[in-house]
Amino acid sequence: MSLESGTYTIRNKINNNPVGRFIVEDRSLLPKRVLSLPQDNRSELPVWKIEKSKSDSYRLKARGGVTTAIDNMLFALLLEEEGLLSPSEWRLVPHPEHGPDVYNIVTPDTGYGWTVTGEDMAQIEVVPILPNAPTSLFEVVPLEHE
């Protein structure tokens, strides 16, 4: 059940909040936080570009910034550079028992994965996960299905 490259929305399963960058950010080129955003009917859902790279790996982009873990927190990089702040590859591990589009999003090398606390505006953490815990499950839906 692999994903095709394309445009998606991502929601956490603990409270169905959208995941993405906040609409208001500083204007620097520093990495931008990726958050569990509040459900707000006035705002558009954050859009993600998911690009299939290696066999089971993907690059996930939030508003143009490719994601990576920095100090166990999820950020979007505006400048892709090799070295300390290089983009991460992610594996999307399906969990069909929780729904057709539900995944853990983990690093291929460490197995650390995205986790949410359930609070609005909390930054996504990249830590050891419990695969079936709602805090570590994300719904990744193609945009045309929204």
Image (cartoon, rainbow, N blue to C red):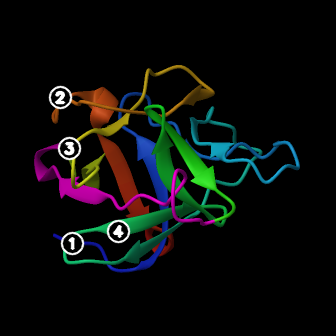
Question: Image quadrant of residue 64?
Answer: bottom right
Between marks 1 and 3 in the image, the one whose residue lies nearer the viewer: 3
How many numbered tags mark residues here? Answer: 4
What label does residue 130 carry, if any?
Answer: 2
Q: Which residue is mark 3?
A: 111
- Distance in Å between CA atoms under marks 3 and 2: 11 Å
Q: Are marks 1 and 4 in contact (CB under 8 Å)?
A: no
- Depth order, front residue of 96/49: 49
Q: Reading the chain from its start, which is encountered first: label 1 or label 2?
A: 1
- Distance in Å between CA atoms under marks 1 and 3: 18 Å
Percent x, y of residue 38: 63, 32
Q: Reading the chain from its start, which is encountered first: label 3 or label 2?
A: 3
Query: How would you classify the magenta stretch by its main secondary structure?
Result: loop
Q: Secondary structure at mark 3?
A: loop
Give the residue type that dot 1 points to.
Ser
Q: Reading the chain from its start, which is encountered first: label 1 or label 3?
A: 1
Mark 1 crowdedness (10 Å alpha carbons): few <14, some 14-19, many ≥20: few
Q: Reading the chain from its start, which is encountered first: label 1 or label 4?
A: 1
Q: Which residue is mark 4?
A: 58
Q: Are marks 1 and 2 in contact (CB under 8 Å)?
A: no
Q: Are marks 4 and 3 in contact (CB under 8 Å)?
A: no
Task: Please give the range of residues in magenta.
Answer: 80-98
Residue 86 at least partly seen: yes
- Distance in Å between CA atoms under marks 1 and 2: 21 Å
What label does residue 2 carry, if any?
Answer: 1
Q: Residue furthest left?
A: 97
Q: Reading the chain from its start, which is encountered first: label 4 or label 2?
A: 4
- Please indicate whether residue 84 sits to the left or right of residue 136 in the image: right
